[in-house]
Image (cartoon, rainbow, N blue to C red):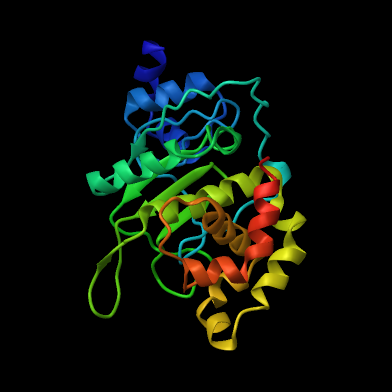
Amino acid sequence: MTELVSTVQNDPLLEAWLRSERLRRWKFIKLRAQLHLKDNDCHDPDTGEFCGDGGGGGNGGGGGGGTAAPASSAPKPEESGGGSPKREVTVYGEGKSQNKTKISEAVQSLPDSHFKYVNDVRFTSQPRIKAGSSIALTNYAAGQYNSENRHIRVADEIPSKDGARRNLDVTGVTYHEVGHAIDDVRGLSRKLSDTLRADFNKMKPEEKYLARYWGQSDKELFAEAYKLAFSPAQKSAFSMGYKRAGKVFSKSIEAIRKEFV
């Protein structure tokens, strides 16, 4: 390994190749870590391991959500044979320490039947997140989920015309993004599409307008409804208060909860 590191450091072409290629073998991930390469796309899909401690590459959606790959793209974790999975949740990035704690606590609060679907996900906290989704309504996002490398990012704040504001519902945003990660494995947004759409169409015109971001995608509808069904921080959902949102999306909440019984 030492010889290989030395060879790479003396060969700029090989080092550039290491920076640009998605490496699938653990020995190369260790090599990249030794070289302190900063490319955030260093993820081994076979082991779920990352090198370095930077944020993940790629873009998800804006406004607290992200686009997710088809369910078949992510392997379904082994069913647990009873007992709780080992909860080792490290939150990376340069976000505020209190928000890192909130993200970690949100993940720790997930029931066992949910956590097993995200125990391979990397969590990052950062000051701001540029929205990269084609359906984003603003330039910045509260959170993002990248389905290619199973990476969730949560922002400290969302810039607005009045200046930056802190992301007030870190727990809720984390649950929303976890909803995307679970959907990535189980394909629940497709399975429950009719129920989600029926509930969305119960909204008043002005409510539907404010919630139009989530209405553009079944994946976003599911992730926000998942947050509504399970997040312990009950602040808002679909740009409505929790009480009103819970009434409108009651059928979706019931259907989602049944999926985890």
Q: Position of residue 258 (x, y in %)?
A: 70, 47
At 44% from the left and 50% from the top, the residue drawn is 232
* Front-most of residues 118 and 45: 118
- Position of residue 8 relative to residue 125, above or below, is above
- The image quadrant where one finds the N terminus is top left
* Front-most of residues 25 and 150: 150
Whether residue 120 is visible to the viewer of this picture, yes or no, is yes
* Front-most of residues 184 and 234: 234
At 61% from the left and 45% from the top, the residue drawn is 182
- The image quadrant where one finds the C terminus is top right
- Position of residue 117 relative to residue 194, above or below, is above
Q: Is residue 187 left or right of residue 17?
A: right
At 46% from the left and 33% from the top, the residue drawn is 18
- Position of residue 129 relative to residue 30, above or below, is below
Which quarter of the figure has residue 15? top left
Q: Position of residue 68 (x, y in %)?
A: 61, 53
Whether residue 10 is visible to the viewer of this picture, yes or no, is no
Q: Position of residue 90 (x, y in %)?
A: 37, 33
| Residue at far bottom of view | 205
Q: Is residue 63 left or right of residue 116?
A: left
Q: Position of residue 47 (x, y in %)?
A: 56, 25
- Position of residue 48 relative to residue 219, above or below, is above
At 54% from the left and 41% from the top, the residue drawn is 149
Please tell me how many numbered marks the rendered image carries: 0
